[in-house]
Amino acid sequence: MELEQSAALDAETKIAEAPGDHKAELRLWLRLLATNTLIETEIRRRLRERFEVTLPRFDLMAQLERKPHGMTLGELSQRMMVTNGNVTGLVDRLLAEEIVTRRQHKSDRRSHIVSLTEKGRRQFARMAKEHEDWIAGMFGDLSQNEFSTLTKLLGKLKTSVRSAIAQS
Amino acid sequence: MELEQSAALDAETKIAEAPGDHKAELRLWLRLLATNTLIETEIRRRLRERFEVTLPRFDLMAQLERKPHGMTLGELSQRMMVTNGNVTGLVDRLLAEEIVTRRQHKSDRRSHIVSLTEKGRRQFARMAKEHEDWIAGMFGDLSQNEFSTLTKLLGKLKTSVRSAIAQS
DNA sequence: GAAAATTACTTTAAGCCTAAACTAATTTTC
DNA sequence: GAAAATTAGTTTAGGCTTAAAGTAATTTTC
């Protein structure tokens, strides 16, 4: 009842809008951006303070951790949603710290497989545990219900964005 | 009915979780991050393609546009959630393009006021219009109801994150 | 099976971004 | 009102990131 009424109100609002006015959409986007920046900045700060590591390096290690047999640079760049050149540079720096290894692909000589070293695996395990607690702490005020609704709606938004990008 | 049942299930799930296990929180964070990156990357691409402008410059112009009398560098950096040094550099580049002006504060000689030039205002107006349509297009698959729920929940998440950061 | 196209990756140039150290001006403290 | 603390902004060194151009290997096409 309550839900349906608010849906009806929203529909009216939409009709009442001036054509081409998208203030609500813009507000949602700005809120998404602000929330993301807030979390990201704090995570960066803690990663640096506690582990002297950057977020991109942590992210790369997190990707590799899930693939014990390693991953090509291309696969890494796809999963991390960054360019190939970016990954080349990150891997170079992590190689120097002996966090990862890079070896030639067996059959395709253009390709290289990157894996975590034992040192890298140990270091990531330490960080991942705290990282999880940080996130849980930041999300703590949400109820289980709000939680799953938000996850679901973000999934839907992601799909919507993807389709808008695809057909543009 | 349906809602309450799923809430009960969720509460059970929470209790059933191993202590210190925060997989659901992590998944939500990764989804937020991925959605944000997806949108941001596409917006950057379009801004560059259509207007040869970067997202940080667009963001700075958007802040200034709302304050016709201008803003100090510190206020800008606060609103943009970036460092002072970052804003110094951005303003330098926008000055060179005659998008903004920088003049001394009347009473506080440490402070400088940045404003949009007429050229900057015109340029921003052109961009803002398309930008709004892009966002609306990307968010198009969501119903009005999902829309307002998502906005509300993100607001709550932001508050939760802020309080976690404040007390750490 | 040679030419053309594609793929995997690297390099380069330029901008973004940060933390830390700095300068100069203002405010607070005593 | 002089010393100490704070504030506004800049500079610097280093890492992140991208687009574009380049190299080398592989696959496709005919």
Image: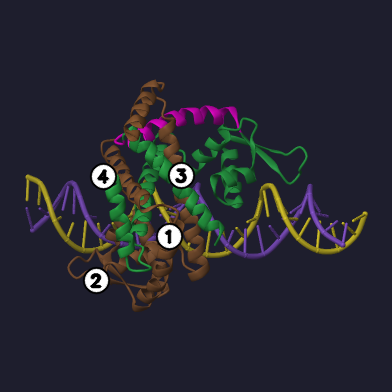
Chain colours: A brown, B green, C purple, D yellow
Label 4: chain letter: B
Residue under disc 1 on the same chain as residue under disc 3: no
Q: CA distance from mark 2 to mark 1?
A: 28 Å
Question: Is B129 in the magenta?
Answer: yes
Q: CA distance from mark 4 to mark 3?
A: 25 Å
Q: Which of the pair B10/C4 is nearer the observer?
A: B10
Q: Look at label 1 and name its amino acid.
A: Ile
Q: Which residue is mark 3?
A: B155
Q: Look at label 2 and name its amino acid.
A: His
Q: CA distance from mark 1 to mark 3?
A: 17 Å
Query: Circle 4 — which element?
Result: helix
User: In the drawing, what numbered circle is on residue A69?
Assistant: 2
Q: Which of the pair C15/A116 is nearer the observer?
A: A116
Q: Is residue A122 above or below residue B137?
A: below
Q: Main secondary structure of the magenta part?
A: helix
Query: For residue A61, what is the image quadrant?
Result: bottom left
Label 1: chain letter: A
Q: Which residue is mark 1?
A: A135
Label 2: chain letter: A
User: In the drawing, what numbered circle is on residue B2?
Assistant: 4
Residue under disc 2 on the same chain as residue under disc 4: no
The mark that comes first in sequence, 2 or 1, is 2
Q: Look at label 3 and name its amino acid.
A: Gly
Q: Do tag 2 and tag 4 residues touch (Cβ < 8 Å)?
A: no
Relative image position of residue A37 (x, y in whole percent)? 47, 50
Q: Residue at x 65, y 31 (%)?
A: B69
Q: How many marks?
A: 4
Which quarter of the figure is the C terminus of chain B placed in? bottom right
